[in-house]
Amino acid sequence: MAETSTKPTSKDRTIIFPRGDVGILLLHGLGGTPIEMNNVARNFAERGYTAMCPMLAGHCATEADLVATGWKDWYASAEDALTTLEQRCRVVLVGGLSMGAVLAAMLAARQPQRVHGLIMFAPTLWYDGWSIPWYRFLLKLFINTPSGRKYRFVEQEPYGLKDERLRMVLAQSMFSGDSTAAGLEATPALALRELWRLVDALKPELPELRQPTMVVHAREDDIASLTNLEYLQRNLGGTVESLVLDDSYHLVTLDRQRRLVIAKAAAFVESVARSYERAGAHEHDRLQVVA
């Protein structure tokens, strides 16, 4: 078995498990870290896939570092990681959690020849889950004011986790002051504005996104309601496989049903890889006949 290479440095917390020639690029959420996707990546690697969790620009540092970047910088990080993964893999799928799922969809939409499938874990087009304050809409109205620009969306219980033990561990890590472990304890308003800009840029491109897509969402998602899943089902241009969870909150890759999520996602990856192999074999046979 190939050696696992985990590469955290003082500047780059990217994680990669080099295995086979089918690769999965996994993008973390806004203000998060590659560790969010580590469990999924490790399980994919155990199944023989190469998995990579890149660190997005401005992350794993301070709120000021995050605010100094925008969604186009995050997209550039994802595209650079895609290029790295392509050097090893002949088939590449892209996935992501929360904002990372939205970013993964943008990558798939803009790189249709390079991305063969998409997995969206708890995609967040809107912060409209049951734990989000009702007055959230006011932020868009005053975000360009001095007070609005200074606003911080502080993480609060249940922190995206229905599993109480994991919730306690996550909270301790998040509020430890080490943003490389569990991400920032608060999301700056200007970073939220960049997410809104990313979503606005993605929406017109969804009908052109024709790669097979899997969307995983919790029925009781505390951050992003099922409206997000329903919107994607209506607007994505290709086939959409949906998995709705009944015993999880927002962090579906970590919560109580994580094993189910990983198993279903792995089956989806296998299906996409086989389809690509069949298509390649068909094209080879066609060229042989022409020759």
Image (cartoon, rainbow, N blue to C red):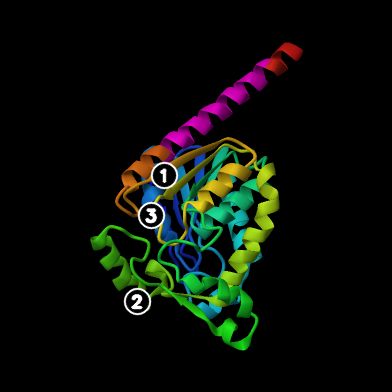
**Looking at the image, residue 196 lies above or below residue 249:** below
Q: Does the magenta-highlighted stretch encompass residue 275? A: yes
Mark 3 residue type: Glu
The mark that comes first in sequence, 1 or 3, is 3
Query: Residue at 65% of width from left, 39% of height from top?
Result: 237
Query: Residue at 26% of width from left, 67% of height from top?
Result: 168
Mark 1 residue type: Val
Q: Does the magenta-highlighted stretch encompass residue 60? A: no
For the stretch drawn in magenta, the main secondary structure is helix
Q: Which residue is mark 2?
A: 175
Query: Residue at 57% of width from left, 76% of height from top?
Result: 139
Please tell me how crowded label 3 is: few (under 14), some (14-19), or many (20+) other residues with Cα within 10 Å: many
Q: Secondary structure at mark 3?
A: loop
Q: Which residue is mark 1?
A: 244
Looking at the rendering, the stretch of residues picked out in magenta corresponds to 265-285
Q: Of 288 and 102, which appears nearest the observer?
A: 102
Q: Position of residue 58 (x, y in %)?
A: 55, 71
Mark 2 residue type: Phe
Q: Which residue is mark 3?
A: 220
Please tell me how crowded label 2 is: few (under 14), some (14-19), or many (20+) other residues with Cα within 10 Å: some
